[in-house]
Amino acid sequence: MREYNFDGLVGPTHNYGGLSPGNLASQSHGGEPSHPREAALQGLEKMRFVSGLGVGQAVLPPQPRPSLRALRALGFTGTDEEIITRAAREAEHLLRLTSSASAMWTANAATVAPSSDTADGRVHLTPANLSQMYHRAIEAETTYAVLRAIFADTRHFTVHAPLPGSSHFADEGAANHTRLATPGHAGVHLLAWGRSAWQDVPGPKRFPARQTLEASQSLARLHQLDAKQVLFPQQHPEGIDAGAFHTDVMAVGNERFLMLHELAFVDHAGLLQMLREKLGPEFRAVVATSAELPPKDAVKSYPFNSQVLTLPDGTMAIVAPIEAQETPAARQFLERVVAEDTPVKAVHYLDVRQSMNNGGGPACLRQRVWLTDAERKAITADVFYTPALHDSLAAWVRRHYREVLRPKDLQDPQLVRETMTALDELTRILKLGNVYDFQH
């Protein structure tokens, strides 16, 4: 079994809408000009780098934005251009919500369980409903269509429909999911949550808790996971209030290694003890205290929103945002991770500032999927990274993406036409078929 990082291609409407309460980067950069072309090329360079390390790499496409389907559902009628013009005039905030390129953060696209861990021996994928925020909730239907197109062979894959779109089953995807495993021990799944729809548990006071316990429990059932191999840690309310809206802002794990902030989970010490019991002596964990790494620095620089990757030689490497290098406390913590008795032997810092400005680091930009050779061969879409695909996608970005996008540019009716043209061409490059509503 090999891990593949399915990175989201940044969409043509990448902009800073300031749409996510609790996401401090999104809030602080709201209204600033963005650079969609640069953002997409930064994402492609990260894919090139990860592939160059010898790690499996693939891509997921952007979604159509502005979402005309969403605007029509909200009562706007007429031609495509008339809909955009009317929305800009009557409800500019709705136009911003339906223009978000947030699907680029594919850690939120779905939760995935490998075939080695499921009762029926298939890979299970469940698109996240992202019901807590409207601009993200409208992603679920297209994500479902895209995943069904890629993972189409039902002998190997089960793609579930998103959980019911209510606050009761609010699901944020793999940003709250961590799978750990050691040789000779079954994989352990951490399905974290921030609030419960039924139980009275202490919660954050400043920012909303997005994932529910009930959603996490439902995912474990859908994916046919062994109940003894699933843990449901609660996100620490103080961590959420510090800006850690998802688990992957305060913790990241890979196989036998987990690094986390002490404000990642309630009773992190008890959680680590359970993991040691389930995974044995090869399991390693490194905890950052608030004294060593103040929560504000962790949230600003995203050292935990790094990718921890297993290299062909069996060692691990961290791919971190350049902001973590520029923040002394974050850099020193990552240096400690390498210096201690852990599988991590190197840290690489990459520039993904266009994504970071909206609150998404290297880990936000990828969905982890574990595949056997047979499962990999069963995927016929051209989504696996190669230098040739990189060149095709980079040329596609340069043809279709604007260099600068200002908030008022979302009101340009021509933007939706540019996006449709680009995405229609992309589905042919990736051999996905007609996955978008405008293609039907």
Image: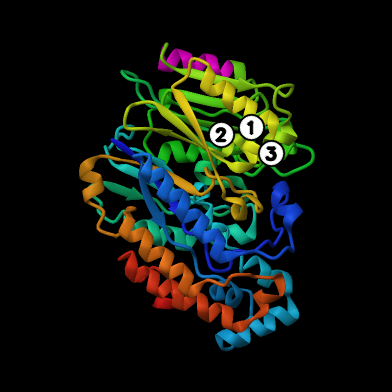
Task: Identify the residue at image location x=47%, y=68%.
Answer: 397
Q: What separation in Å lies between label 3 and label 2 (alpha carbons)? A: 18 Å
Q: Secondary structure at mark 1?
A: loop
Of mark 3 and mark 2, the one earlier in the sequence is 2
Q: Residue at 73% x, 59% y: name it.
A: 30
Q: Amino acid at mark 3?
A: Val
Label disc, if present, on residue 299 of the rendered structure: 3
Name the residue type under label 1.
Gln
Mark 3 or mark 1: which is in front?
A: 3
Picture coordinates of residue 250, whole percent (x, y): 62, 33
**Residue contact at pointers 1 and 2, CB within 8 angstroms:** yes
Disc number placed over residue 343 in the picture, else none? none
Chain part drawn in magenta = 270-280
The residue depicted at 47 percent of the width and 19 percent of the height is 342
Pinpoint residue 188: horizontal percent, then vertical percent: 42, 26
48 shown above or below 404: above
Q: Which of these two is toward me, 196 or 420? A: 420
The mark found on residue 235 in the picture is 1
Pointer 2 residue:
192
Relative to 263, is 78 above or below? below
Q: Quadrant of residue 138?
A: bottom right
Residue at x-position 58% and y-position 58%: 102
Residue at disc 3, secondary structure: helix
Q: Earlier in the sequence, mark 3 or mark 1?
A: 1
Say if mark 3 contacts mark 1, CB within 8 Å: no
Magenta includes 200? no
273 magenta-colored: yes
Location of the N terminus (image quadrant): top left
In the image, taking residue 86 as reference, residue 352 lies left or right, namely left
Q: For the residues marked 1 and 2, what is the alpha-carbon distance in whole angstroms?
A: 6 Å
